[in-house]
Amino acid sequence: MLIDFEEIHGQSRAKKLIGRLIRSTRVPHALLLTGRQGIGKKSFALASAALAMCRDSENNSFSPCGNCNSCRRLRSNMNPDLILIAPEGTVIKIDQVRNIIPELKFKPSYSAKRVIVVEEAEKMTEEAANALLKSLEEPPPHNIFILLATDAHRLLPTIVSRCCQIRLEPVPHEVLKRIAIDKSGLDNDTADVCAFLAGGSIEKLNEWCTEEKLRTWKEVNQVIENLKTQPVWKFFETAKALTERFDSFEDFVYLIKSKLVLFIRSEIRSKRKERLGKLLDTLDFVEEGEQALRFNVNKLLLAEEIGLAIRECMHEEDSWNKISRTRIYSTL
Ligand SMILES: [Zn+2]
């Protein structure tokens, strides 16, 4: 649990900013880390916590010393001065916040500061958020709150206004690609695909670098390739198989979407603009389908519609009887 900023890829701007804040004499008592899901907010929060908690006051670097009582206890996951709050089920309940409040007025046991990390802070119930707000308004000394959220707009404005906000940027494609090559031993082209699918997130990169996930990517490519030559009835069979076989149908839709984005990029590079409009329309359509998945949409119909749309735009096939796209949503 002792994480050093050195171990975190990218985020050089945020690291410098937070390092300076923590090393300054006026450390903010509440930080808000925002950034898309899977971007590494928790690791970043833990690295910030380790630095703020480290007792080596002579240390001017942005790394915890690793030797003081706080650092040693963090390393063995035995430091009670680090408090983690995460959703229980789908929300962070008021009791989870209330339970920690009495402790805050005491000095930390082993560390220079006590750090309270609130993961997915947007999932606090209103009561929980209001309970936390009281501590943010009159913070007992020696405590630092680090709130994590995908977007500041999803928190109470009163909470946001009391925090020093730091935005984490998506990890650059080239950095992700290098990690995929060095850590997962992927070849250049596969690493390129994985970095693309990861969309700026280390967490997602680790997911996509697995053999199983890469197999689904190959399958999706095959399905798209087959669309060129397959008769309609054959494709409908494939669609049915896809909805049954894919463990996560969301993954299938995501991969289709990614494939479209890659097509669009190559289309832009090749300066052939004829298909671009259609490709962008199809991408919109697939994204709508992705959203609709949250509402129990009929997956088979969605798979069929996506297949037809892709065949039409990628393989320049216009002779299809288009199925009305509203059909997808009629099953909501
Ligand atoms: Zn230390």
Image: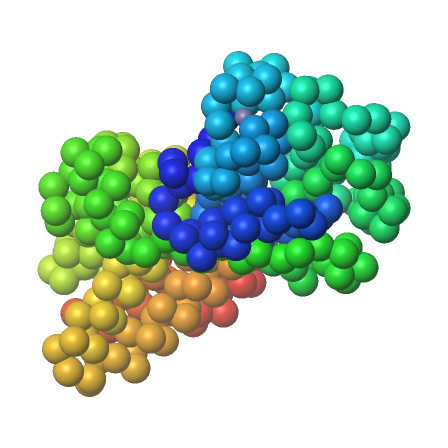
> Closer to the camera, 159 or 58?
58
Q: Residue at x 63, y 19 (%)?
A: 79
Residue 206: percent from left, percent from top = 34, 37
Rendered image quadrant of residue 128 = top right
Q: Indicate which quadrant contains ligand 1.
A: top right
Residue sitting at x 59%, y 17%: 69
Depth check: give the residue in front, 64 or 316: 64
The C terminus - image quarter: bottom right
Which residue occupies 25% across, 41% down?
179
Instruction: Locate residue 88 relative to residue 204 in the image: left or right.
Output: right
Do we see residue 190 in this rendering? yes
Q: Position of residue 13 (x, y in %)?
A: 45, 57
The answer to which of 11 and 121 lies nearer the viewer is 11
Position of residue 124 measured from the top left corner of the image (x, y, whole percent): 75, 44
**Left or right: 73 as drawn, with respect to 111:** left
Q: Using the image as rendered, state which of residue 302 and residue 217 is in the foreground.
A: 217
Q: Which residue appears at 17% of the width and 45% of the height?
A: 190
Residue 122 image offset from top left, x and y in percent: 68, 49
